[in-house]
Image: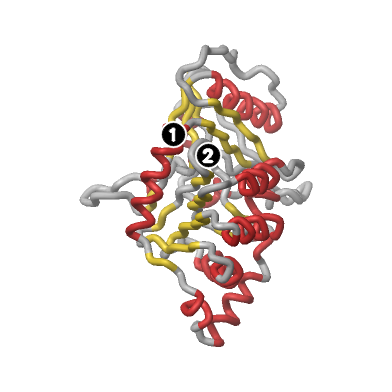
Amino acid sequence: GVGALYSWPRARRILEREGVRCATFLPPRLVPPSFSVNLRNHRKILVADGAIALTGGANVRERYLPTPGEDSPRIRDMHFRLQGPIAAQIEAVFRHDWQFVTGEADLVQVVDFESAGSAVCRAVAEGPDMDRLTELLVGAIGNARRRIAIMTPYFLPPREMMAPLQAAALQGVDVTVILPAENNLPYVHRASRHMLWELVRRRVNVYYQPPPFVHSKLFYIDDDYAQIGSANIDSRSLRLNFELNVEVYDRAFVGTLHDHFTHVREQSRKVTLEELDGRSLATKLIDGGAWLFAPYL
């Protein structure tokens, strides 16, 4: 409901005018007062006929598309097309949200399809009444033996994730985090920079990838496990938002992600402890001030 206020004209009015059924998730209101405006639905779901699903990091927004005369969009992202039973799982999350908002129990008929490929997948819905993603991420990090790769636009990991990342790096696991050098939320960039020294000094590799702003969310370990979806590595996604991630067990898929990740890493700039320690006192104070609001950024 709050995010829909970011644009004009309102998307819902345009869609309803063309006959599209629409509903607003937790709309803000004054009477009676709404106390849940901070709990947003951050999921990205599109499902066709229960058979094909699209999910990932991309929003349905003009800035994610190239404008006339430009070679690339102003925001880069990575989205995924999935087929098979996983599409029905993702649609079930949408159906649950639709029922929550409208009270309608039966939106569409979900059809079960046979497996479409070799990957084993599972949809993981996250919300303020759950704590699944943090537990899954921490568990995956603890099981890594060769590498841990994270790409996220907003990186403010909870304490229960910081320690496993540091421990894995100290045990010789290649732990790499790629962040955007140019962030659309400067205060999040500053808050993240305030705590990076804790990871860098424990041999975690942190890179800044060059502009334009990259909104991709990727997580994989070793050669056969990945998570894709809407969640960022921050308290808002892991504690407040309604999110959707998909676990994927498949060596070929993880290999494709690794090729992309390696290509981006080669083009990115590594963050050093000397760089972080060399910030001016004023910059450190501003970064630290932004970090105080990390649970709500």
Residue lying at 60% horizontally and 24% vertically, measured from the top left: 89
Question: Picture quarter containing residue 212?
Answer: bottom left
- Quadrant position of the N terminus in the picture: top right
Residue lying at 70% horizontally and 48% vertically, measured from the top left: 29
The residue most toward the left is: 69
**Mark 1 and mark 2 residues within 8 Å of each other at the beta carbon:** yes
Q: Is residue 163 above or below residue 257?
A: below
The answer to whether 221 appears left or right of 215 in the picture is right
The residue most toward the right is: 32
Q: Residues within 10 Å of mark 2 (few under 14, many from 20)?
A: many
Q: Is residue 40 at all visible to an observer of this figure? A: no
Q: Position of residue 238 (x, y in %)?
A: 66, 49
Amino acid identity at mark 1: Phe
Residue lying at 45% horizontally and 69% vertically, measured from the top left: 271
Q: Residues within 10 Å of mark 1 (few under 14, many from 20)?
A: some
Amino acid identity at mark 2: Ala
Q: Nearer the viewer, residue 215 or 68?
A: 215
Q: Is residue 255 at all visible to an observer of this figure? A: yes
Q: Is residue 88 above or below residue 204?
A: above
Q: Position of residue 41 (x, y in %)?
A: 62, 42
* Element marked by disc 2: strand
Q: Is residue 116 above or below residue 259?
A: above
Q: Position of residue 91 (x, y in %)?
A: 58, 24
Q: Position of residue 39 (x, y in %)?
A: 68, 48
- Quadrant position of the C terminus in the picture: bottom right
Q: Is residue 166 above or below residue 109?
A: below
Q: Mark 2 sits on what residue?
A: 226
The answer to whether 245 appears left or right of 52 in the picture is right
Residue lying at 63% horizontally and 76% vertically, measured from the top left: 289
Residue 253 — which label?
1
